Image (tube, rainbow, N blue to C red):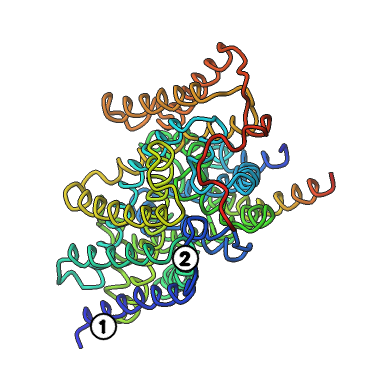
Amino acid sequence: MNPATIALILVAAIILGTIVFALAGVHRLRMTPTEYMVGGRTFGALFLWLLMAGEIYTSFTFLGAAGWAYGKGAPAFYILCYGTIGYIVGYFLLPPIWRLGKERGYLTGPDFFVDRYQSRWLGGAIAILYFFLVVPYVTLQLTGLQVLLTLAGYGAFNATATVGIAFFAIALFVFSAGLRGTAWASVIKDILVLGGVIFVGIFLPIHFFGSPAAVLDKIIATNPKWLTLQPAGPFPPIWFVSTVILTGIAFFAGPANLPAVYSAKSENSVRLNTMFLPFYQLLLMLVFFAGFTALLVAPGLKGAAADQSFMIVVQKYYPAWVLGIIAGAGCLAALVPASALLLSAASMISKNVLGDLFNIATSDRSRTRATRAFILVIAAMSLAFWVFKRTTMVEMLLLYYNGIAQMLPGLVFGLVWPRVNATAIACGIAAGLLIAIYISYVANLPTWHGINTGLFALAVNVAVCAGITLCMKKPLLDGPQHSAEQKSLSIPGRRLPD
Amino acid sequence: MVLALIPALMLSVAVPLVNRIEPRIFGLPFILAWIVLWVLLTPAFMYCIYRLEGRS
């Protein structure tokens, strides 16, 4: 058999095996919206860990981290820092949100806004905004998938159709399995990715240079500036600090993160997860080693091709079955988070837009059905977007983080500052987004005087939000913690049988 | 809260201050060793906070 066939069969077997395994895990469950969207709020600490790690560490994390180590050097280290800071923020932010979610039956991220600010419009607007951020993020995973499939096929076939098939398979999978299915799929994904990262991060350096430290020696000898931040370069220290702060605090503001938090069985399993997820970050250091090794073994990849760095080394120097397994792990790292994103976006549209704003599909059965329909619609849209517009990926990712960061004042102020209301939050978000879009697209600057664009936009957002709050009269109706009597006012179909 | 700020600051604003290669620690350039050290210490800090919160 030729090597491309072996590698591709292995990739297909891994993807199908994972789907079958995860479907077995959700066999015979009744799919109420609570079960479907947030796993019935029954996930213990370990299962939650697998789901969160499954969502957070995507194909882009691994290919991109190696690609940055390969193409940019020390600026790549920011990836280690921001996730860890994200977990520290999450330790304080997530347990109170989980508690409210449990008490008041939240299913989606925007549900928090609807309930806390007593505004279905704010919730609907945020749902739509998230939706526009999810599509590019999913397409990013499709690009990762394409890179991996093309490599596994030894460049001999056109991966576009295969990407479509694999993505359609995963959309159908989450269509039937819901969030619990994604969590089961994460079990296999995490195990394979762990094995793959240890192989490329430890075994590759040992094979070619004797040890990871020897790789670093060699990098330092050939390019002494590669492993430190260069004040004169495109990624100066101020860029590093501001980017770490922005992406760190925005870490859990993504559309799929809050449903994962709601799925926890207890506050403590949320807390334990944010405490111990930093250990997972260390895998990324191994990915850097893989990227550095690739830089020495196969130099000369430019631009987006740098993302293929260590995979090209594996393809060139190892048998097809090794390539197949690693590419299969990588494909899962694209598909599992994509499934969570599809589910979260579809949940928001069916719950916060159709249900809360237009009063459509509010019964349990029709809500699950509407969510399922939207999964397929969003999957088809993402695929179409990807086919026609795949050149602007990096811009899209930047916009994604800059965008989700703008949700943060709403979450944090919502918990700690009773006076803040929907108008202030909405104006803050609008101001932040306009600034981010202006700097990135109209003024066309990569950063604002070296400071991360999103961080500057977030500062404007906070200032606008706080300014409006202080200027407005103290509202009569405060947040949920202050007005227990209006509990049943806002969200129809909220109290669901658990 | 104050305890949690320590690793957060060490991983953000302190990084430019350790922006150098020497001394190497286990072969890692100093900047990377510093980051890895604080990534490893973060769970320890969070565990302390967790215990302190539990008591109050």
* Disc 2 to disc 1, C-alpha distance: 33 Å
Q: Which residue is at the front of the view, A46 or A149? A: A46
Point out residue A337 in the picture as x, y percentages from the top left corner. Answer: 41, 58
Dot 1 lies on which element?
helix
* Quadrant assignment, res B7: top right
Q: Name the amino acid type tagged 1.
A: Ile
Task: Count residues near mark 2 (Cα–Cα under 10 Å), then give few for <14, some for 14-19, many for 20+.
Answer: some
Task: Tell which residue pokes out farthest to the bottom in this image.
Answer: A1
Q: Is residue A26 above or below residue A382?
A: below
| Viewport quadrant of the C terminus of chain A | bottom right
Badge 1 is on which residue? A6
Which label is found at residue A482?
Answer: none
Q: Name the residue at 52% across, 24% down.
A: A462
Q: Name the amino acid type tagged 2.
A: Ala
Chain identifier of the residue bearing label 1 in the image: A
- Do pointers 2 and 1 mark residues of a single chain? yes
Point out residue A307 in the picture as x, y percentages from the top left corner. Answer: 31, 57
Q: Is residue A474 above or below residue A341?
A: above
Point out residue A113 in the picture as x, y percentages from the top left corner. Answer: 52, 35
Point out residue A56 in the picture as x, y percentages from the top left corner. Answer: 47, 55
Badge 2 is on which residue? A214
Viewer-side label of 2, 1? 1
Q: Which residue is at the front of the view, A393 or A299? A: A393
Left or right? Give the position of A179 relative to A64: right
Dot 2 lies on which element?
helix
